[in-house]
Image: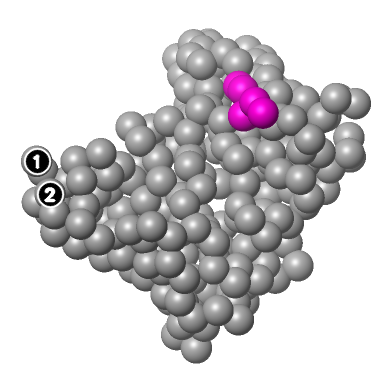
Amino acid sequence: ETGVTQSPTHLIKTRGQQVTLRCSSQSGHNTVSWYQQALGQGPQFIFQYYREEENGRGNFPPRFSGLQFPNYSSELNVNALELDDSALYLCASSLVRQPSYGYTFGSGTRLTVV
Amino acid sequence: SQQGEEDPQALSIQEGENATMNCSYKTSINNLQWYRQNSGRGLVHLILIRSNEREKHSGRLRVTLDTSKKSSSLLITASRAADTASYFCAQSGGGSEKLVFGKGTKLTVNP
């Protein structure tokens, strides 16, 4: 059984550019959630995808968008990058939308916007 | 903000001692979860306690939940240097699919 895999692990982008982060969910998991964690803070919910449909969104602007594929892997896209977008982006997968056993998180993608 | 809070923000203890971290939250929950994070990497799920449970054990971990006070505590007994990490509580519920995390407690266990 594989865990959650995120790529790339680190990324440096320039303000105004666009970025795509990728997540492969744990085998058998059909739900993927994305979180943003700024330095020294707890993770904040961006959105969740369940069976290829968005299933809830946090307080993030529309330039944060996502996608889930038929194999349940997912992408997070951020357009018009701002300096404040620098953070660790975490992907979490689960078998259902609100699991009673917790989520499985990936190791994250560290995004730096300069 | 719905964000909960952990207390203390930082904790430094000697190996073998017990570590207690507290968490307060603001809204109704289905369950409360605790996660560990090493050096800004991914989160590892430690334990989940449901809103109708008061105490739960897993190995050296003990979690309590007081829904009347909207608070939870995580106790790590006989701590080890490898327990050095940040610990986060996360509330789940209120009809929402998201986890709401606190800011975390940074635990340092000195050998």
Q: Which mark is residue B15?
A: 2
Q: Residue at x 38, y 32 (%)?
A: B40
- Which element type, helix, strand or loop, lies under badge 2? loop
Looking at the rendering, in which quadrant would you find the N terminus of chain A?
top right
Q: Residue A45 vs residue B110: left or right?
A: right
Q: Which residues are magenta?
A: A1-6
Q: Is residue B7 magenta?
A: no
Q: Amino acid at mark 1?
A: Pro
What is the count of numbered marks? Answer: 2
Q: Chain of mark 1?
A: B
Q: Chain of mark 2?
A: B
Placement of B5 over or under A50, stated as above or below: below
Which is the main secondary structure of the residues drawn in magenta? loop
| Residue at the bottom extreme of this rendering | B68
Q: Residue B37 vs residue B43: left or right?
A: left
Q: Residues within 10 Å of mark 2 (few under 14, many from 20)?
A: some
Mark 2 or mark 1: whose residue is earlier in sequence: 2
Task: Mark 2 vs mark 1: tell me if same chain.
Answer: yes
Q: Is residue A24 visible?
A: yes
Q: Which residue position holds label 1? A: B111
Q: Residues within 10 Å of mark 1 (few under 14, many from 20)?
A: few
**Depth order, front residue of B18/A70:** B18
Q: Is residue A65 visible?
A: no
Q: Residue at x 49, y 58 (%)?
A: B47
Q: Residue at x 14, y 59 (%)?
A: B17
**Depth order, front residue of A100/A82:** A100
Q: Which mark is residue A47?
A: none
- Which element type, helix, strand or loop, lies under badge 1? loop
Q: CA distance from mark 2 to mark 1?
A: 5 Å
Whether residues under marks 2 and 1 lie with C-beta atoms below 8 angstroms apart, the answer is: yes
Placement of B103 over or under A10, stated as above or below: below
